Image (cartoon, rainbow, N blue to C red):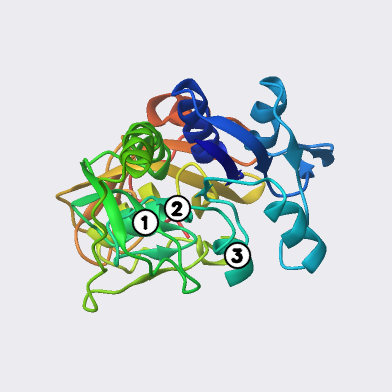
């Protein structure tokens, strides 16, 4: 089919690669405009933009697709369908109704749970045991369209947002290719989403990433893994020069009791409001991620130390 692809992050780049490899014609790729990235804050293209250019595809990066000129340019592509994967913009009815067969979105949750911007992180943070990827027909409402196909993916005890992202990206790329073939053949069944069980995956705020050791261990563990690797849940640890900020990137729940924030052993088991969490991977300010054994050799935190 002749398609437009609209996406921005790594998750979407994997889907674009699969669609290309399946033999579809990509008339144009849309992505968010280049943004400041890295230490120098130089303007850099998104992962989808960079990948599309490496494959010789036409790329457009409008700040908005809502204007009549952009809608007309989109209409002039003469599309069979459009594929949207974590694009980052809301599409208007004019855009949604332009392709002959419609616009279809690959979403990283089991709808109607976790509609919105951060479904992978929110699923882990909520303690969900399972998530998945689904393809839906796009409507004007936020992730409210009927579902065409889906795959479930279990959330393992040591999954982080990073590892789950990679699993869902692979599963989603396969599912998208299969669903596009079914759409082309006219053999898809569209199932309306349930009206019950709707939840919204709000965008992750770095301001909410600080750990509160007074919370139960299970909740803290889910928060650590759900915010890893970015933005990273963090706490403060005492040092000779004052308090140092440390990100917690991986953990597991264990038995333990003490004052909230108290280090309980030499392996960084930390007491919580209920139970304890074992920190497995951390990152000091200005340093790279480290397994906790390596971290403690250079920054020892003895039993009885109180973390903030």
Residue nearest the observer in this picture, 292 or 157: 157
Of labels 3 and 2, earlier in sequence is 3
Residue denoted by label 3: 91
Residue 188 shown left or right of residue 11 in the figure: left
**In the rendered structure, are the residues bearing label 2 and label 1 in contact, judged by CB atoms less than 8 Å apart?**
yes
* x and y percentages locating residue 47 in the rendered image: 64, 34
Calculate the distance from the C-alpha at mark 1 to the C-alpha at mark 3.
14 Å
Q: Which residue occupies 20% across, 65% down?
A: 274
Q: Quadrant of residue 192?
A: bottom left
Secondary element under disc 1, as helix, strand or loop, is: strand
Residue 219 against residue 287 in the figure, above or below: below
Secondary element under disc 2, as helix, strand or loop, is: strand
* x and y percentages locating residue 108 in the rendered image: 37, 50
Residue 247 against residue 15 in the figure, above or below: below
Of labels 1 and 3, earlier in sequence is 3
Calculate the distance from the C-alpha at mark 2 to the C-alpha at mark 1.
5 Å
Residue denoted by label 1: 136
Question: Which mark is drawn over residue 121?
Answer: none
Residue 306 against residue 173 in the figure, above or below: below
* x and y percentages locating residue 125 in the rendered image: 34, 58
Q: Which residue occupies 78% across, 68% down?
A: 67
Secondary element under disc 3, as helix, strand or loop, is: loop
Question: Which mark is drawn over residue 105?
Answer: 2
Residue 90 against residue 247 in the figure, above or below: below
Q: Which residue occupies 35% across, 44% down?
A: 183
**In the rendered structure, are the residues bearing label 1 and label 3 in contact, judged by CB atoms less than 8 Å apart?**
no
Residue 107 shown left or right of residue 4 in the figure: left
* x and y percentages locating residue 26 in the rendered image: 60, 33
Of labels 2 and 1, earlier in sequence is 2
């Amino acid at each position: 089919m002749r398609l437009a692809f609209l996406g921005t992050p790594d998750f979407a780049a994997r889907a674009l690669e699969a669609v290309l490899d399946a033999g579809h014609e990509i008339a144009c790729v849309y992505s968010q405009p280049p943004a400041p990235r890295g230490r120098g804050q130089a303007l850099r293209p998104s992962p989808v933009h960079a990948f599309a250019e490496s494959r010789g595809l036409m790329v457009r990066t409008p700040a908005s697709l809502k204007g009549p000129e952009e809608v007309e340019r989109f209409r002039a592509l003469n599309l069979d369908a459009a594929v949207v994967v974590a694009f980052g913009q809301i599409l208007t009815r004019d855009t949604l109704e332009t392709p002959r067969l419609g616009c279809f979105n690959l979403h990283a949750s089991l709808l109607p749970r976790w509609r919105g911007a951060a479904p992978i992180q929110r699923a882990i943070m909520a303690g969900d045991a399972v998530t998945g990827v689904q393809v839906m027909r796009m409507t004007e409402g936020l992730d409210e369209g009927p579902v065409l196909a889906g795959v479930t993916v279990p959330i393992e005890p040591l999954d982080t947002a990073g590892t789950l992202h990679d699993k869902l990206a692979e599963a989603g790329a396969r599912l998208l290719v299969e669903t596009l073939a079914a759409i082309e053949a006219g053999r898809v069944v569209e199932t309306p989403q349930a009206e019950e069980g709707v939840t919204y995956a709000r965008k992750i705020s770095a301001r909410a990433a600080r750990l509160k050791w007074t919370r139960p261990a299970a909740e803290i563990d889910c928060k650590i893994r759900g915010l890893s690797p970015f933005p990273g849940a963090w706490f403060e640890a005492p040092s000779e020069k004052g308090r140092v900020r440390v990100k917690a990137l991986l953990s597991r729940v264990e038995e333990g009791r003490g004052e909230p924030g108290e280090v309980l052993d030499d392996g960084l088991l930390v007491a919580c409001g209920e139970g304890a969490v074992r920190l497995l991977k951390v990152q000091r300010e200005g340093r790279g991620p480290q397994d906790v054994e390596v971290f403690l050799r250079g920054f020892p935190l003895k039993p009885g130390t109180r973390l903030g």
